[in-house]
Image: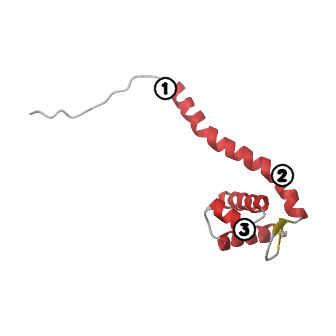
Amino acid sequence: MTNELNELATFAIVATERSFTRAAAKLGVSQSALSHTIRRLEQRLDLQLLARTTKSVAPTAAGAALLKDLAPALEQINRARLIAPSTALEAIATNLRGVCELSCPVRQL
């Protein structure tokens, strides 16, 4: 699932930026890697998501429809990833109860 989510997130960035060059710079990967990721996603979905020319990239009708649903979902996932660690730590901290015993060897001088 992680790989599929990464593919979808990559598509959203390329579609939003409307440029493989800008998306590659934003993600810190090569244009070739982005292109392969998008092609793999398109093959898996059996849909062309981006219309490519030598000078531009734009979502197809299918790509625009996917992006419309995908953008809010990715936003929610990113918010959850930011909130989850602090919420988990709070849950642990508020549930700590009891005695803690430590055993330490004593060195005699």
What is the count of numbered marks? 3
Residue kind at label 3, given as amino acid type: Phe
On the image, the x and y values in percent for residue 72 come to 79, 47
- Where disc 1 sits, the SS reads loop
Q: Is residue 70 left or right of residue 34?
A: right
15 and 43: which is toward the camera: 15
Residue displayed at 68% across by 59% down: 6
Q: Earlier in the sequence, mark 3 or mark 1?
A: 3
Q: Residue furthest right?
A: 61
Q: CA distance from mark 2 to mark 3?
A: 21 Å
Q: CA distance from mark 1 to mark 2?
A: 41 Å
Residue kind at label 2, given as amino acid type: Asp
On residue 96, the disc is: 1
Residue kind at label 1, given as amino acid type: Leu
Foreground mark, 1 or 2, reads 2
Q: Is residue 71 left or right of residue 1?
A: right
In the picture, residue 24 is in which quadrant?
bottom right
